[in-house]
Image (cartoon, rainbow, N blue to C red):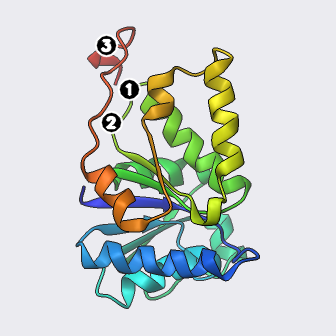
Amino acid sequence: MKSVVVFCGSSEGTEMAYTAMGYELGSELAKKGIRLVYGGAKIGIMGKVAQGALENGGEVIGVIPEFLKKKEVFHDSLSELIITKNMHERKLAMHDLSDGILMLPGGFGTLEEFFEMLTWGQLGLHQFPIGILNTNGFYDELLLMLQKMVSKGFVKLENYQAILVDQDISQLLEKMENYVPLPIPKWINKEQL
């Protein structure tokens, strides 16, 4: 795993643990030589992840759509800032620049980006490890909902189990490094990928 896209909030949330964990993740990625790809802002948890990586010599690529660049405070000290036309191009660029996916606490946008990448993996469009850094149990209820989707027949157990979850950064990154991808679904052939 050489490059990880991190989805997280552009807000700091209500607990200092969220921003502290964001900074620590960025720092750990830099120390391991893993490039950070993220949403390009210098505010919120996003900003802390970037700061942690940059202050520890890491490579950081921000990807931000033009309309958000005008509204949000984008980070001007990144290794590279990529500006896209829209959110769809942003997600595709993030996907193309990464070989791992990680989610920290965040809101609707964080969930939307994460679940689109998760769906692409389920469809066999990528075989990246997908992790959730479950800081202070932030995603406990979401994980219960996903388990309900399995028990009610809407999600296959193996697809749920492919989501790697931990509250510890080192342990989660180790799980991601050792991830064995699911086979590409039989109903999709290689020409469709």
Could you say where residue 116 lies in the image, as x and y percent from the top left?
56, 40
Which is in the foreground here, disc 1 or disc 3?
1
| Residue assigned mark 2 | 127
Q: Are marks 2 and 1 in contact (CB under 8 Å)?
A: yes
Q: From the image, tell me which residue sits under label 1.
A: 124
Looking at the image, residue 106 sits to the left or right of residue 170; the answer is right
Q: Which callout, 1 or 3, points at the residue further toward the start of the chain?
A: 1
Q: Residue at x 68, y 65 (%)?
A: 67
Q: CA distance from mark 3 to mark 2?
A: 15 Å
Amino acid under disc 1: Gly
Residue 59 visible? The answer is no
Res. 189 mark: 3
Which class describes the residues within 10 Å of circle 1: few (<14), some (14-19), or many (20+)? Answer: many
> Where does residue 11 sit, x and y in percent of width and height?
71, 74
The quadrant holding residue 135 is bottom right
Q: Is residue 127 above or below residue 42?
A: above
Count how many numbered circles sit on residues in the image: 3
Q: Quadrant of residue 143?
A: top right
Could you tell me if the residues under marks 3 and 2 are in contact, i.e. CB atoms within 8 Å?
Answer: no
Measuring 24% from the left and 47% from the top, which residue is drawn there? 178
Amino acid under disc 2: Gln
Secondary structure, mark 1, is loop
Q: Secondary structure at mark 2?
A: loop
Kind of residue at badge 3: Asn
The residue lying at 29 percent from left, 57 percent from top is 174
Please state which of residues 157 and 69 is positioned toward the viewer in this rendering: 157
